[in-house]
Image (tube, helix red, strand yellow):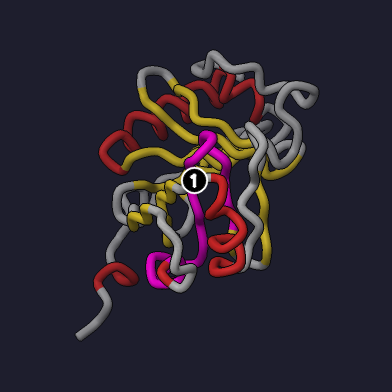
Amino acid sequence: MPDLALTARGPLDGRVAAYARVSVTPMPAASRLSLRARPDAVAALSKALGVDLPVKPKSSASKGSRSAFWLGPDEWLIIDEPGKNLVAECAKAKILHAATDVSERNTAIMVSGVNAEATLSAGCPQNLTDKAFPVGAVSRTLIGKSEVIIHRKGAQAFRVDCWRSFSDYVFTFLSEAGRDS
């Protein structure tokens, strides 16, 4: 029987908004893990996951295809290629933690180009300038009326993770903002 998680269509498949100075495109499917743990579990969980869990606000870490985003003093979002069993990897740590697979709850949108920052700023109250939000920075914030997680992947590239049920709203909002930027 095929793995439906790997063959299912994403909520934004086929949608693209490309303008002269910015593009808004759906990202491929990914495995996602919501991880909660106390500070004494960070080292063991980092070893089990193969990536150092960041411990400073707005920070991220990556190794290979895996990324870890700091969302709070005891909370991370781990993202990797689709099909990875991140919950099973955490279980190897044999330390108290809460790991929940949220792969099907979220989807991601890439906003890139010279006007990427301006496009996001049209609906985001957070300061996304290079100085306040450098490459590698990550934060839970808002786009319009929807909660999102923004990760600055490059000088002109931002990953926006949102709940699938809000993805049409977020994609449309960013597409309209991109057209106007």
From this viewpoint, is residue 71 visible? Answer: yes
Q: Residue furthest left?
A: 1
Q: Is residue 68 magenta?
A: yes
Depth order, front residue of 161/72: 72
Residue 129, image x, y percentages: 73, 21
**Residue shown at 27%/77% (left/top)?**
3
27 left or right of 105 in image: right
Q: Residue at x 24, y 82 (%)?
A: 2
Q: Which one is in front, 155 or 40?
A: 40
Instruction: Name the element at disc 1.
Output: loop
Residue 112 percent across, percent down from the top left:
64, 39
Q: Quadrant of residue 33?
A: bottom left
Residue bearing mark 1: 38
In the rendered image, residue 161, in percent from the top left (x then y), is placed at 46, 41
Could you tell me which residue is drawn at 67 percent across and 36 percent down?
A: 56
At horizontal 54% and vertical 13% (from top left) the residue drawn is: 125
Give x and y (percent) for residue 54.
64, 46
Q: If the image is split into quadrants, where does the C terminus sit?
A: top right
Q: Is residue 82 left or right of residue 102?
A: right
Q: Is residue 20 above or below residue 64?
A: above
Residue nearest the observer in this picture, 173 or 42? 42
Quick check: is 105 in the magenta stretch?
no
Query: Which residues lie in the magenta part?
Result: 67-90
Q: Nearer the viewer, residue 114 or 132?
A: 132
Give the amino acid at mark 1.
Answer: Arg
- State the residue lying farthest toward the bottom: 1
Left or right of residue 88, residue 21 in this image: right
